[in-house]
Amino acid sequence: MGEKKRAIWVFGDYRNYFQNRVTLQLLSRAKELAAKIDAEVCAVVFGHWTDEWVGDALSHNPTFCGVVGESIAHGADKVYLTDHPRLAAYSMETYALLMERLARREGPEIILIGATAFGREFAPRVAKRLGTGLTADCIGLDINGEGLLVQTAPSFGGNLVAEIVTPERRPQMATVRPGTFQEIPHDYVRKGEVKRVSMPEGLPADRVHLISSERFLPRERKLEDANVVVCGGRGMGSRKKFAKLFELAELLGGEVGATRPVVYADWADHDALVGQAGKHIRPQILFSFGISGAIQHTAACNDARFVIAVNKNPNAAMMKRADVAIVADASQLCTTLIQELKRRIR
């Protein structure tokens, strides 16, 4: 028998994959990484009532493919699927145990998980069970000359960006923020293997039971998907002045982002945070008002195509990386832009 092919796994959190695209984004990057180490890309899916989705996936129904078909269409060569009533609702203990057993049996080289609220709870427990390392909230992934996964993540409170490798332990594990990578276009004719994995017998009972759940309505538009983002920092001066950014964003058809000091000051919701512990954005146009440019913020918006920065300090880091830098009071310029746009928009 030949040597077993190496594999990069992406955990498929499908509970809201229509809006939450991080799994598909990770499959896209995994496909690029796999080409460098001659590996196959595998998605791992735990759930219930997935049979109808698998049927559609295998027939490549262009109108509805479900999570398995989506995984294959976006880069997975194989999907490990465990379908059982006990998996209908997420249970951290059960999911982590299943992932551990499957990984020990199959021996993946790399496991990637989205840095969502779920992933931040799930991934470290899997890493602990497997006795391996984990780099959290990565903003970049690559393969070095030795074939190791280079995991780029902010460190020391976001003041530095570190490149981390796991030279000995396997699998190499990382969580990645939503929006860090772009998903590849849906390929309706791409084929892949679906490998069903039976639910193990004798699993310990869950110590935590779901009594009820309620889904919050998502924002109409996601910050990480916006083509225009108006970001504000402490330089806006006050909560009242920061609120002007929402009016400006509406006029521009964009979304509002914020830095960590602004969120901590309760000028904006945490959902608007752009930075180490928030969203990674890649807009066509980024407006930066009153932002100094700390690395934990700039690392999350480096993929913006065109940056317009406004700050009183011409030497601010954000001003130096902007395509257009305007030395002015951020709040006053924001007011002027709003007035001018209202005058011109009929």
Image: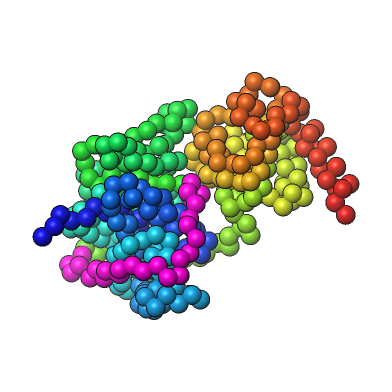
Between residues 95 and 18, which one lies in front from this camera angle?
Answer: 18
The part of the chain drawn in magenta is 178-203
The relative height of residue 131 versus residue 76 in the rendered view (above or below) is: above
Residue 138 in sight here: yes
Residue 256 rendering spot, x and y as whole percentages? 66, 46
Left or right of 60: which side holds 320? right
Between residues 309 and 82, which one lies in front from this camera angle?
Answer: 309
Between residues 216 and 231, which one lies in front from this camera angle?
Answer: 231
Residue 100 location, quadrant: bottom left
Residue that appears at 28% across and 61% down: 94
Residue 65 rendering spot, x and y as whole percentages? 44, 73
Residue 202 counted in the magenta span: yes
Placement of the N terminus among the 4 image quadrants:
bottom left
Residue 168 rendering spot, x and y as whole percentages? 20, 38
Residue that appears at 70% across and 32% down: 324
Q: Give the main secondary structure, helix, strand or loop, of the magenta stretch.
A: loop
What colouring does the structure picture have?
Answer: rainbow
The relative height of residue 333 versus residue 182 in the rendered view (above or below) is: above
Residue 325 location, quadrant: top right
Residue 273 counted in the magenta span: no
The relative height of residue 170 versus residue 197 in the rendered view (above or below) is: above
